[in-house]
Structures are given as structure tokens and as C-alpha cells.
Amino acid sequence: MAARRVLLPLLIAAGVVCTSLFCGLSFVSGSNVGTTRSLRTSQRAVPVEFGSSVSTALEVTAAAWGANIALLLVPFTFLIQLYLQSERTKAEKAELGYD
């Protein structure tokens, strides 16, 4: 029974170490380990009429910035209002003695 308790964590740890070594090389060196495509091949895949990559990157960044504002600010504002309303209700109940 003790062998079972040790074997599974060791297998999981070995899997994590192997995965981190394999994927870590790709992350640190900046190249994909599994693929051998050159940079020229991928640059020719983008049509010329789309403009430069800098303008495209700026357009994507502006859209992402707007999405962050909409998807983070609106829910947080709702949650803050909900918290303030519940605290006000709790204070009113305590003042009236409804505890």
C-alpha cells in the first residue's frame, strides 16, 4: 500500500520535469522544437495589401485595450455597487435592530 502512495506522485513529478524540459527549451530559445520552418517562409505567407505589421499590431492592441476596459471595468463596477448596497442594507438592519 505504501508503494502506491509513492509511485503516483513520482510519476507525476517525472512527467512535469520532462514536460518542462521539453517546453522550456522552446520558451527560452525562442524557437519551436518540433518545427523547422524558416522565418522567410512565414513572412511570405502574409499578403502585401494588409500593410505593415506595425500598423496591424497597433490595431490589434487598441482593440485588446478596449476589450479589457469593457470586460473588466463593467463587471468590477457592478460587483462594487452590489457590495456597497449590501453593506448599506446590513447597516440599516443593524440600526433598526433586525439582527
Image (cartoon, helix red, strand yellow):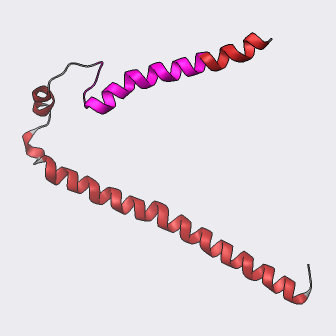
The question of residue 92 being in magenta is answered with: no
Where is 70 relative to 31, above or below? below
The question of residue 30 being in magenta is answered with: yes
Is 54 positioned to the left or the right of 34 in the image?
left
Q: How far across and how far down the image is residue 36, in percent?
A: 21, 18
Q: Quadrant of the C terminus?
A: bottom right
Q: How far across and how far down the image is residue 71, in percent?
A: 47, 60
Is 88 positioned to the left or the right of 36 in the image?
right
Q: How far across and how far down the image is residue 45, in percent?
A: 14, 31
Q: Nearer the viewer, residue 2 or 63?
A: 2
What range of the chain is rendered magenta? 11-34
Q: Nearer the viewer, residue 39 or 67?
A: 39
Q: Nearer the viewer, residue 3 or 39?
A: 3
- What residue is drawn where x is 12% and y is 26%? 41
Residue that lies at the very extreme toward the bottom in this rendered image: 95
- Main secondary-structure element of the magenta-colored stretch: helix
Q: Quadrant of the N terminus?
A: top right
Where is 59 relative to 25, above or below? below
Q: Quadrant of residue 68?
A: bottom left
Q: Quadrant of residue 93?
A: bottom right
Q: How many numbered marks have been drawn onto this rendered protein structure? A: 0
- What residue is drawn where x is 66% and y is 16%? 8
Where is 12 relative to 94, above or below? above
Q: How far across and how far down the image is residue 21, in percent?
A: 40, 22
Is 56 positioned to the left or the right of 34 in the image?
left
- What residue is drawn where x is 7% and y is 41%? 48
